[in-house]
Amino acid sequence: MSDYTLLTGCTGLLGRYLVRDLLLDGHRLAVLARPSRKESASARVEGIMQMWEQQCGMPLPRPVCLEGDVGQPGLGLSSSDRAWVAANCTSMLHSAASLTFHADGSGEPYNTNVIGTKNVLDLCADLDVGNMHYVSTAYVCGLREERVMEEDLDFGQRFRNDYEMTKLEAEKLVRSAGFLKQLTVYRPAVIAGDSCTGYTNTYHGLYMYLKLMSVLVWNTEPGPDGVRHTPVQLEMTGDEPRNIIPVDWVSAVMCHLLGTPEAHGNTFHLAPEIPLTPRQIIEAGYVYFNSRGVEFVGPTPSSTPISEMDEDARQNMGMYREYEGSDPEFDLTNLQKHAPHLPCPVIDDAMLHRFWKYGEDDRWGKRRPKRLDPYRSIEEHCADLVVKSQSKLDPKALKVNFRVLGPGGGDWHLHIQSGRLTRFERGLSSESDASLQIDSKVFWQLTSEHKDFSVDSASESLDAPSDCRVRTLTELCSALFGVSVRHEQIVSTPTHGSGSVDFQTQADKA
């Protein structure tokens, strides 16, 4: 076993943050991804990783990518991928979900939220994946006025929509799965964009309101004083609490809890200590747009619209009307116990302005996505190097964990015999003699047909015991880079007690 976590929903807003943060935290991660009409599953995941690399300014590890779909029995995995999960995955992080509020002809949200969760559980049962981390929603509570406790689940509550109802049914399925060795449940409130950048890839929830305000206000001519007048009446007091949380905080908290064994087995409400209010949103908009004119008239019966803008606002806000009346207070006992150092950022005017700025720059989701930087598949290249041996595998074969960062990179486990690559498998192994981590650019430089070849880059990134470091470098150079290195060319120079190797002369290109 290699202690991998299999993540579903990796291309969603929360999922792509979990991918980044889990990898940066050192977790061994596999992801389930569907192909789109234009891209393969692996290309979609590569696009997410390149986006993060551009933001982070550094090459990143890649998760093991498995093509599949939670809506299919067995998650639609191939037999080889299924075998890989059985051999390597000990935990499931089920984040995939449909945010469709009301049932439609496609079968959503039931198909993804309920059938998809059942398919995930069936796979875990079949392959003995007993550690489940499940992403539910705080709104399994339905229409509740009182404080919602973490142990609360089914109280015969009424629901605002089919989304809430299916998420409750899914959480009940997970909790009734007797084969699970451990279950940790995360119940986030309404997830918004990135608190620092405003980034989002979905324009639901808060962003729907922000988009509506942006479109209506910018299409209003300013008056003589330069102020845009927006005659809109909102049937609320303006002080109703709204449990909205930034996605980067949700991911940071979940990654911390995932890496904290004593936190496992609990239920966590991921909600703000200081909720946002509609009045704060409107007043932040006044500053952002230089506008005025919204009235909070209280929860009165629907009246005649006072303007064309008022009528447009009412029509477009109907989808979320069920949430305008109330938003309960969520108990945060477990969260405050296990992650007290990670308080939820308060959504203030500056953050709301970042949300608007990102949405407008993104044309509210219509901006053309950035094209992938060209990359070559290291997996395909190395697979071609594998030598089919007629003899049994040498128990003394060199076993190396090989990680390549950056475009086209990934994690693999290598078996090398007499300088030849005899096995090349996805993922890192818990049983290895050494590990090598390099940048994909360095990898391709090392495989190029230059007359002179230096393995300093590989040497600096090798982690191996001092007594087998020379052998490891020699066999790696031969198997991966087609280089013969004579032992007399290598001088072993211990550095900080690690036994690093300096190559005094250029190696011979095989």
Image: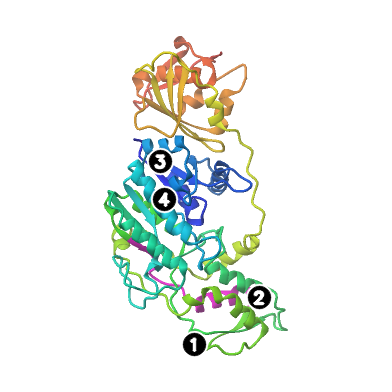
Graded by Cα atoms within 10 Å as few (under 14), some (14 to 19) or many (20 or more), the crowding at tag 2 reads some
- Check disc 2 and report the residue beneath it: 216
At 53% from the left and 35% from the top, the residue drawn is 409
Vertical relation: 440 (above or below) 253: above
User: Mark on residue 28?
Assistant: 3
Return the disc, 1 or 3, that comes first in the chain's sequence: 3
Q: Secondary structure at mark 4?
A: helix
Return the disc, 2 or 4, that comes first in the chain's sequence: 4
- Check disc 4 and report the residue beneath it: 119
User: Mark on residue 298?
Assistant: 1
Q: Secondary structure at mark 1?
A: loop
Task: Tell me if 486 is positioned left or right of 149 in this view.
Answer: right
Vertical relation: 248 (above or below) 442: below
> How far apart in space, not on screen, are marks 2 and 1 (Cα)?
22 Å
> How far apart in space, not on screen, are marks 4 and 3 (Cα)?
23 Å
Viewer-proximal residue among 500 and 468: 468
Viewer-proximal residue among 249 and 39: 39
Foreground mark, 1 or 4?
4
Whether the residues at callouts 2 and 3 have beta carbons within 8 Å, the answer is no
Identity, as a three-letter code, of the amino acid under mark 3 = Arg
Q: Secondary structure at mark 2?
A: helix
Foreground mark, 4 or 3?
4
Identity, as a three-letter code, of the amino acid under mark 1 = Gly
Q: Which residues are magenta?
A: 268-290
> How far apart in space, not on screen, are marks 1 and 4 (Cα)?
45 Å
| Quadrant position of residue 358 | bottom right
> How far apart in space, not on screen, are marks 2 and 3 (Cα)?
46 Å
Magenta residue check for 309: no
Magenta residue check for 274: yes
Return the disc, 2 or 3, that comes first in the chain's sequence: 3
